Amino acid sequence: MPNGLKLLVQYDPTTPMTAVNTMYNVGARDEDPSRTGFAHLFEHLMFGGSLNIPQYDTPLQRAAGQNNAFTNNDITNYYITLPAANIDTALWLESDRMLSLAFTPQSLEVQRKVVVEEFAQRYLNQPYGDLWLKLRPLAYREHPYRWATIGQSVAHIEQATLDHVKEFFHTHYHPGNAILAIAGPLESQHVYEKVLHWYGDIPGRALLPKSLPHEPEQREHRLETIHANVPQQALHLAWHMPGRLHPDYPAYDLCTDILSQGQSARLQLELVRKRQLFTSINCYLLGSIDPGLVVVSGMLTQGTNHDVAKAAVLEVLHRLASDGCTAEELQKVQNKFAANHMLSEVNVLSRALNLAWYELLGSADMMALVLDEYMGVTADQVRRVAQRTFADGFYSELRYAPTAPS
Amino acid sequence: MYMPNRLQPPPIQVPRTLPALDTAPLPMVGFVPCYCAEGGLHDLVRIEMVYPAGTRFESIPLVASATSGMLREGTTSFTAEDLAAHMDFYGAQLATDISKDHASVSLLVPGLHLEKVLPAFAEVCAAPAFREPDLDLFKERSRSALEVNLRKVEFNCRIRFSSLLFGGHPYRDEVDPAAYERLDVAAVRNFFQTHYRPSAAACFIAGKGTEQAAQAVAAAFAKWNSDARAVVQSELPCLIYRAGSSYTAQADAMQSAIRIGTMAPTRNQPDYPAFFVMNTILGGYFGSRLMQNLREEKGYTYGIGSAVNHLAGASYIAIATQVGAEHTQAALNEIYSEVQQLASYPVTFDELDLVKNYITGHLLQGLDGPFEQVVRLKILVQNGLPATYYQNLLEAVHAITPEDVKKAAATHLSPDALSVAVVGPEDTVGNISGGITSK
């Protein structure tokens, strides 16, 4: 659109519902290191009333709609589902808060408290809840992925001021930094005209190029042990990997699937079933836009020590790096990916979200190509990425050790 | 230029018709009744076999959930590893689930591969192996997960609340990690033999090509259909509910978990629609009174909600939240105050209309697409409710008056009927004044 907003429409006549997904290209990675957790706090404030509409939720609920939002290290995403006939209500609400928020001090004061309680509930008040608060700064030294979306500490949230809020809005919340994706039983031309009506008068602002610090290559093994009131020993290992747009990304993803997706995967078979060193173990990657992490997370069986457990994990990883995988293993994870890919497109909401996400990555067309990319991965590619990742011994290691019960 | 009127909400339309469900089983599949929700854009089908084998049927602690969990651990012709590899290879997801009344085994698979994995799926349901080493691993894994849960105030509060409602009744929750030690293969086999009978099963199929899938299911299960086992009688004992309270200290807790609730009307009782609307106003959506008060005005919590839960022999309402420890008493007061408000004063038409519309959207969303529809279909079939149930409910909801809402709260949520469980730091729960106070 002329003001820089991108609109994507997917027509699906089989449903009476429409999904309206608004994705802003701003996440925790865009925060000032002295004000972490701000993107997420800001997401809460987006529900505190906008320029012309005192309450966001009320009119939407009256229009039989449901909504929510999430923030991660890369993006902030707002989504609505409602009967297709009421799409104007969704566009009215979303366009008004893109135009300007109400910026009331009360909203900031209450949401600061709410986010502090969210911090406590999700990260501090349950065993292992602080994993990402500890593992991120161990694995990242420079890049803003070193802090978790919730923020580095409760203090950062408590210090947020209304001026910070306004500045953040001005920098990141404008049409050129947003992608609107709409899926449902509405023709694209019809949707386009409605979006033009509601968003056409929102002024475009200059898009500032992101200049995020580059994470230097990790040249050592890093180890941290957390002594905490947890029931069981746990082990987390993290290796650096390229970002989401790197051509090897699908190979990395399938590599982690071969290692741990499903009960027939290598780590499960070898370390849970056969050697019984872990009660559960998982290998996964953080699908972040900037260079991410391959992570192995496991819960140790009683009486197993961390050194033995870790050596056993490394043995499995090194074997994949040296010998590669079988054709059957590769086909298994590719079939599984294809099934999951289909599953991720079952409802209008996840389709709208996927459209916006791929557009943000570069082009919504990628959504159609991603399956082919995964199907085209070869066993040799899997071996090479495993080799590149696991061979050198430079990784971050986080151990949880139970303190004596109090 | 574009000049939208931003001051005036756009006109809205709220549909009054929900998609119809078909509660009649397919006629042609003899032994196990198959219920279908057809549709979807993708070649995916989900098959779920449901057995009356929930936790309420167990006489040995944890045996029902162990039996359910062990179904994925191999069959007479597949080891646990081979079974997993076989399912994974065809992109199939095999899952087990258990509630208090039912246990189920489900298969989600691209239609293209359905016939490849159905024979193994049938074996999972009818001829599981229950090998001892696999059970040992299962016990260790489950015990470990339980130990983690037992460190969470939210989990402990749920358990305390459940024993206030269901203590001594088969609907109680079992959470003693040591009970895993006492489980053995014989107990699991015995539970399976008794409760996973083909003649008591129902099959729910959702996605694309459900009728064809039903034929394939019938063929795959044909050899397991002989069922000479005796029907077990397991009458649910009468539940005698008396309100109670439980305040439990948990070392190191930063927040208190709170649960408050009581018995509720069941889905087929005449005042259920009014109770359902009342629950929504109280804590059933983001705009609810509890959420607005405790989160959006006071910032005591990240979230609070109330929900009506249905079991085969009882329904109950539970209000649940986690609050900053220092707000425990204040939060309790506010919750009781909101309940009392609802029971004392009629809601405004404005609030009531909003909630009716919200509920309409919620029901529509819950019936959008075959994988959502099958969840509702299962509820209807399992509870003997008619195909028109949700449409009737929607119409009844729209007919509710402010007086109906007030009456539902006054009748069912009187202060002496409410049970309360709080788990939090010692200095906090020790000081809860008289348990119940209200403004």
Image (spheres, rainbow, N blue to C red):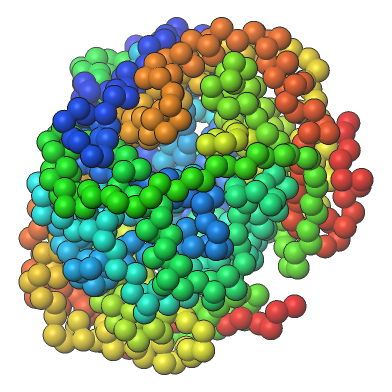
Name the foreground residue: B142 vs A392: B142
B142 vs A270, nearest the viewer: B142
Compared with residue A231, is residue A188 higher up or lower down, i.e. above or below?
above
Q: Quadrant of residue B403?
A: top right
**Residue B239 falls in image quadrant:** top right
Can you see residue A208? no
The count of marks equals 0
Q: Going 26% across and 28% down the picture, which residue do you hit?
A: B25
Q: Residue at x 62, y 42 (%)?
A: B237
Q: Residue at x 47, y 54 (%)?
A: A28
Asked if one can make out residue B403 in the rendered structure from this viewpoint, the answer is yes
Give whichever of B179, B403 is nearer the camera. Answer: B179
Q: Please, is residue A200 above or below residue B290 in the view?
A: above
Residue nearer the viewer, A110 or B139: B139
In this view, the residue farthest toward the right is: B434
Horizontal and vertical percent for residue A217? Answer: 33, 79
B319 relative position to B125: left or right: right
Q: Position of residue B294 (x, y in %)?
A: 72, 37
